[in-house]
Amino acid sequence: MTAATTTSRTQDFIDADERWSANNYHPLPVVIADAEGAWVTDVDGNRYLDFLAGYSALNFGHRHPALVEAATAQLGRVTLTSRAFHHDQFGAFCRELAELTGTEMVLPMNSGAEAVETAIKVARKWAYRVKGVPDDAAQIVVAGSNFHGRTTTIVSFSDDEDARADYGPYTPGFVTVPYGDAAALAAAVTDRTAAVLLEPIQGEAGVNVPPPGYLAEVRRICDARGALFVADEIQSGLARTGTLLALEHEGVRADLTTLGKALGGGILPVSAVVGSRDVLGVLRPGEHGSTFGGNPLACAVGRAVIRLLATGEFQLRSAELGAHLHARLGELIGKGVSAVRGRGLWAGVDIADGGLTGRQAAEAFAARGVLCKETHGATLRLAPPLVISEADLDRGIDAVADVVSRG
């Protein structure tokens, strides 16, 4: 059973949210009370197929048994020590994540934005201590249409006015070039460039995939100019695109990689910066930290996530089901859809001119029992959990086809 109208019970919850919370989101009128796997249930008992997966935070679905078991076991032992002390989960988490990603050192944090802020700080410190950039002169080259979070520093180099407007004065030290334009990037990188910070696939911008060879060229440019390549894999990483990291599609490695969202298994915020010892090793005690970063509960859940990824099962599911997803979505071009982009179980679907707005389409999907969310007007972002069955995947795609074709 699915709901097409808002009941009085649902409205009571919505009214409470709107009365007591700041108006910084515009949710669909669905109040979720329970969830499992790829499905959620609202307060009236209506079930919905989750085609958003918490913006990739729920890669393993809702309440994956292995992750719930790890969290429950750790809740009965110790949840927080702060980094003032060692605890028995921290070192193992860092080692296992480094081994999984083929890196040398890990710096755990909480949110994705916190991981990006950490990478920015590390890149600047590296530029001053190792590269020899004059004090306060380091620059970081970023891409247009980026989304790396919503902190003051990060929105300083955003070109999304909704995220940026009225938060100035803005943090200096960033140079923006068009995403996917290697020539513009090469022209922008100088001896004072600490790093190039990019999303291998831009999520918030509509699941934008760069031209073939672009990421390899970014790596070459960074090497030639002695700059770091920082890859934001917070949404694209951890099996979402059919490989552990999206950079793997071009055989490229970053100096620093930010991870988050799925690293916490949809249970709690867990993020990290992973990279080489030569770069992360510039930090010394007292120079950067986080009370909750790398806490025992986060590390226990993160280790369970790593165990799931180490088998390769979810990378394979994403690749195989992703091929099916993109083949079917491609059939919709010219039938209410103007373009489809993405990799693995991740797609940006542009609704053709004259059709529904993205918000209208998302509401129509909800009425059909499928939850997803629009981005940038008339683009739908699809990111179902990697545990989804092919039958349920088809159910969601059928809803997309029905909605966009009707306009």
Image (spheres, grey):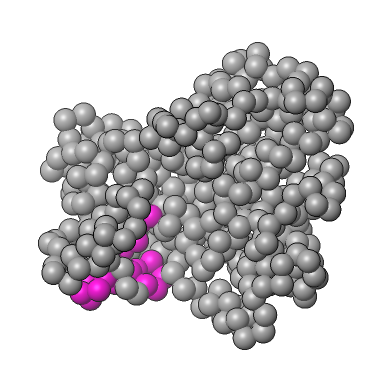
Q: Which residues are magenta?
A: 35-52
Q: Judge whether 219 appears above or below 29 on screen.
A: above
Asked whether, in this view, residue 184 is left or right of residue 23, the answer is: right
Query: Which of 268/161 is in front?
Result: 161
Specify the quadrant of the image occupied by residue 389.
bottom left
Q: What is the x, y in percent for residue 75?
A: 60, 81
Query: Which of 234/216 is in front?
Result: 234
The N terminus, quarter of image: bottom left
Q: Judge whether 109 appears above or below 146 on screen.
A: below
Asked whether, in this view, residue 67 is left or right of residue 173, the answer is: left
Asked whether, in this view, residue 236 is left or right of residue 132, the answer is: left
Q: What is the x, y in percent for residue 300?
A: 66, 72
Q: Is residue 349 visible?
A: no
Residue 205 is one of the magenta-drawn residues: no
Q: Residue at x 37, y 45 (%)?
A: 381
Q: What is the x, y in percent for residue 392?
A: 32, 63
